Structures are given as structure tokens and as C-alpha cells.
Image: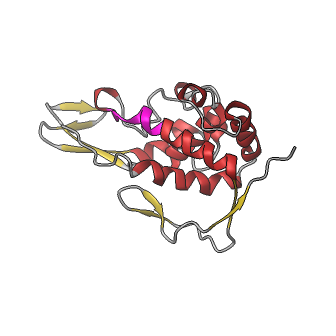
């Protein structure tokens, strides 16, 4: 049986990384325009959040590179041959999400670069293999809260973009540390300013 004890703490972690990357990409203006167009300056309804395609792409790319879960263990239920490798019943197998999510074989030569546009045609078209994106696991044991997590992150990011502008401090040092998930080793110093909607 698989059990992940992440829940609510994983969404803020992913959002922190999203705030880190959003100022660094040209999509920020488009993302804010999308949020203002669809949500205006109010609290977005759930059906409106599903229309935020650019926000969705940024969040998916963030989860691909810096997901809430680094790996997943499974115990082999029976003897199985996988290519040239024999896996015996009872052996624990670790699936490393980070290796799959950064594989050039699946994601292309820019696999280690932050490129939300790879998700413009959806998750199933983003990589060369249908199951290359596994930020929420997959199959029957996939994350039961993935829809809630995505809605929560879209909601918070939309509200933040309506009210604030973000820029990365010059003090930031890019040094991801491997804990339960990838986290910035020295934090993420971000300069936050009020966003004023021009008339």
C-alpha cells in the first residue's frame, strides 16, 4: 500500500518555487494578463480557474522540475523481467520522479530548463512518452488530492498576481537541496511590490 504524507504542505512548497521562476520568464506578463482577463480583480471561482491555461502550464512545469515528491517505492508482487533486469518478488523498487522529469530522452535537450510552453498542448503531449509526467504519481495509486492541489495553487497564484509584482533578489543563490522534495537550500529572497492596475 502506498501512503504519502504530503497534503497541504506540498502546495505552498510548489507555489514558492513557482514564484521563484515566474519573474525569470517572459510569460509573467501573459500570465498576469490571463489572470486579470479571466478573474478580473476578484476571487476566482473554480470554473474560472480551469480556464487559466498559461498559469496551468507554469504550475505543471514547476511540478516537473521541482515536484512535491522526489520518488516513490513499490514492492514487487511477483517475479518480473524488465528489459535485461530480473526483479524478484518482494524486492523494493524506487521510481525516481526527478530522473524521469529531467530525462532528455523524454523531454528533449532542454529537459533541465524551465519551459512552460512544453505543456501548451496538455500533459499527454508534453513529452515523448505518455507517462513521463508523474508529479502526482500515476494509475490507481496516483495522488487523490491532485485536482485540489492544482486548484489551490491556481487560486493562490491568481490572487498573488492580482495584488503583487515579484522580482528575484540579487542575493538569491540557486542551490536546490534534496529533502522530501527539492527545496531552495538558502531560501528564496524575493522582492514583493504592490501591483497597481493601470487605468
Spot occupied by residue 73 in the image (x, y as percentages of width and height)? 25, 44
Spot occupied by residue 174 in the image (x, y as percentages of width and height)? 58, 66
Instruction: Assess whether residue 144 is covered by the magenta stretch.
Output: yes
Q: Residue furthest right?
A: 199
Residue 109 appears in view = no
Segment colored magenta:
142-150
What residue appears at the point 57 percent right and 26 percent down from the top-left corner?
125
Q: In this rendering, is residue 49 above or below 102?
A: above
Instruction: Assess whether residue 181 is covered by the magenta stretch.
Output: no
* Closer-to-camera residue (50/108): 50
Q: Quadrant of the N terminus?
A: top left
Spot occupied by residue 4 in the image (x, y as percentages of width and height)? 28, 45
Report which quarter residue 80 is drawn in. top left
Q: How is the image coloured?
A: secondary structure
* Closer-to-camera residue (93/150): 150
Q: In this rendering, is residue 176 above or below 64?
A: below
* Closer-to-camera residue (49/73): 49
What residue appears at the point 75 percent right and 38 percent down from the top-left corner?
33
Q: In this rendering, is residue 78 above or below 172?
A: above
What residue appears at the point 50 percent right and 44 percent down from the top-left corner?
63
Q: In this rendering, is residue 11 above or below 140?
A: below
Spot occupied by residue 52 in the image (x, y as percentages of width and height)? 63, 32
Task: Report the side of 185 relative to 143 (left or right).
Answer: right
Amino acid at each position: 500500500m502506498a501512503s504519502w504524507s504530503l497534503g497541504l504542505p506540498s502546495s505552498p512548497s510548489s507555489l514558492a518555487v513557482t514564484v521563484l521562476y515566474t519573474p525569470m520568464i517572459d510569460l509573467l506578463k501573459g500570465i498576469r494578463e490571463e489572470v486579470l482577463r479571466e478573474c478580473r480583480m476578484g476571487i476566482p471561482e473554480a470554473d474560472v480557474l480551469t480556464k487559466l491555461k498559461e498559469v496551468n502550464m507554469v504550475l505543471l512545469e514547476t511540478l516537473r522540475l521541482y515536484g512535491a515528491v522526489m520518488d516513490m517505492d513499490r514492492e514487487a508482487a511477483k517475479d518480473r523481467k524488465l528489459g535485461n533486469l530480473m526483479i524478484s518478488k518482494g524486492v523494493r523498487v524506487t521510481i525516481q520522479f526527478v530522473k524521469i522529469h529531467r530525462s532528455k530522452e523524454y523531454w528533449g535537450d532542454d529537459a533541465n530548463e524551465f519551459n512552460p510552453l512544453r505543456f501548451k498542448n496538455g500533459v499527454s503531449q508534453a513529452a515523448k512518452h505518455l507517462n513521463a509526467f508523474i508529479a502526482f504519481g500515476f494509475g490507481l495509486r496516483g495522488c487523490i488530492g491532485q485536482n485540489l492541489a492544482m486548484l489551490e495553487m491556481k487560486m493562490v497564484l491568481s490572487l498573488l498576481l492580482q495584488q503583487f509584482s515579484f522580482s528575484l533578489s540579487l542575493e538569491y543563490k540557486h542551490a536546490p537541496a534534496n529533502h522530501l522534495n527539492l527545496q531552495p537550500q538558502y531560501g528564496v529572497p524575493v522582492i514583493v511590490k504592490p501591483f497597481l492596475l493601470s487605468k
